[in-house]
Amino acid sequence: MAADLKELQALHVIDSLSEVCLGKDYCGSCEPGTCLIRYAQDGLRKCLKEKILYVSDGTKNIPHGDSKLYREEALINGIANILVSCRSCQYEHFEDCIVSVIRNCYEIALFGDVRPYDGSNFHYLTRLASDGMPQADEILARFQQIKKARDEELAKK
């Protein structure tokens, strides 16, 4: 499975999502049916509250029509952060996992559409680079930084 609930809390995923948003004053609304970030936040809150790791029809209901501007650096950081929380589950990967739903929301905001993900972070990051995504190097560098920091923290315990 993707990640556990404690790990999602520890990685401050809700805070990472909040950093992406330019604010209600900037865009004028924050409705879950029209806002990618609000949709992801609401899904994560529901998962944490109900102690589950999936959103029913989570991928299907993502508001693909959201064309708001978001903080690009925060989107890059968010994708890297959410990849660290994913366990590269490959065979157990499922689209409605909250980690996948959040990653999809970030991708739509940053790239304009969902990127292919087969359950392997390595394949995902390699594909971003081979597809010529301009943010690929930044996402990889940030992923490596976050993963190293997390691994060092775990080694201390």
Image (cartoon, rainbow, N blue to C red):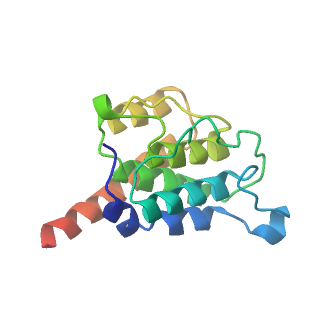
Residue at the image position 76 percent from the left and 50 percent from the top: 34
Q: Residue at x 58, y 39 (%)?
A: 134
**From what the image shows, is residue 75 above or below residue 22?**
above
Above or below, 123 against 25 in this view is: above
Looking at the picture, tell me which residue is in the foreground, 36 or 141. Answer: 36
Residue 17 locus on image (x, y percent): 57, 62
Percent across and percent down for residue 6 are 32, 65
Q: Residue furthest right?
A: 28
Q: Quadrant of the N terminus?
A: top left
Which quadrant would residue 114 be assigned to in this image? top right
Where is residue 89 shown, x and y percent of the image? 29, 37
**Measuring 68% from the left and 63% from the top, which residue is drawn there?**
21
Of residues 87 and 110, the one nearer the viewer is 87
x, y percentage for residue 68? 77, 52
In this view, 135 is above or below 143: above
| Left or right position of 151 against 85 | left
Exactly how many numbered labels are in the figure?
0
Which residue occupies the foreground of this view, 153 or 52? 52
Residue for point 47% across, 48% down: 98
Looking at the rendered image, the quarter that the C terminus falls into is: bottom left
Q: Report whether 121 appears left or right of 37.
A: left
Of residues 134 and 157, the one drawn nearer to the viewer in this rendering: 157
Residue furthest front as drawn: 50
Q: Is residue 144 left or right of residue 106?
A: left
